[in-house]
Amino acid sequence: MNTRPQEFSSAASALAADGWCVLSNLLDAAQTQALADECRAMHDAKLLLPARTGAGRAASPLRGDSTHWFAGGAMTAPQQAFTDRVDALRLALSRELMLGLVDCESHYAVYRPGAGYARHLDCLRGNDARVVSAVFYLNHGWLDADGGALRLYLADGSPRDVYPHAGSLVLFLSAQFEHEVLPATRDRMSVACWMRQRALVAHR
Ligand SMILES: O=C(O)CCC(=O)C(=O)O
Ligand SMILES: [Fe+2]
């Protein structure tokens, strides 16, 4: 069952109060599985490329994932289903929190065993477009012992770990939360997404 509007409202309240929250049921189980199957197949077909960071777009020692950006106008059915739901959520958050979120950008990410992403902020240098970070996880049967937590650092410096269970969506304010991805013992798949405002410098 897809998330109902009141769940979007509770997500908005949680974001306003705490700056982050976890939402379940953005998509139903079949839609989540379709994304997981497609991500796995594209990864096996070597269509995901080593991720880059920073203005120089150099291959980064900070992160070990491979990614594939969803392309507007050329999305597959699973990607379109995800994008439609995330857009509905973006509009609800934008309205309730008066954020002026004009669009989203999303990519698949696969972290192989042992790969992580060092502590960072999602705002790109010189660009304040990213307002809300959203990560939707695609991993069935994930156990805490598999590792791979997203570790968020709260304002007081204390960590909060979110495990990448299939169907969970974590939301947090991009400019406020440093975070890292801890290495896992199995492949870790997700769709990472950023809800954006109009920025002074426009580049991704
Ligand atoms: O996969 C995650 O839990 C977070 C990924 C992340 O921090 C990023 O892509 O910027
Ligand atoms: Fe991040």
Image: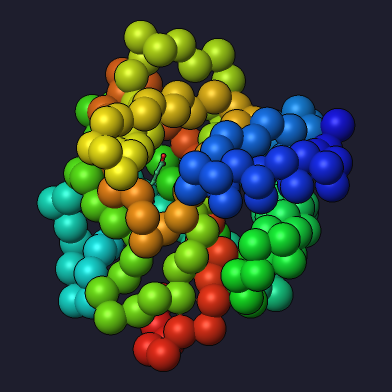
Q: In this image, 177 relative to 104: left or right?
A: left
Q: Nearer the viewer, residue 118 or 7?
A: 7
Q: In this image, 71 relative to 89: left or right?
A: left
- Residue 153, horizontal then vertical, whole percent: 30, 39
Residue 3 visible in the shown view = yes
Residue, far bottom = 200
Residue name at image x 60 percent, y 27 percent: 166
Residue, far left = 61
Residue name at image x 31 percent, y 23 percent: 184
- Residue 183, horizontal then vertical, whole percent: 26, 28
Question: Is 83 drawn above or below residue 118 in the view shown?
Answer: below
Residue name at image x 29 percent, y 56 percent: 121
Q: Nearer the viewer, residue 196 or 167?
A: 196
- Which image quarter: residue 7? top right
What kind of colouring is applied to the model shown?
rainbow
- Which image quarter: residue 11? top right
Circle count: 0
Residue 107 visible in the shown view = no
- Residue 112, horizontal then vertical, whole percent: 32, 33
Please identify the quadrant where the N terminus is shown. top right
Question: Is 49 drawn above or below residue 163 in the view shown?
Answer: below
- Residue 50, horizontal then vertical, whole percent: 30, 54
Please identify the quadrant where the C terminus is shown. bottom left
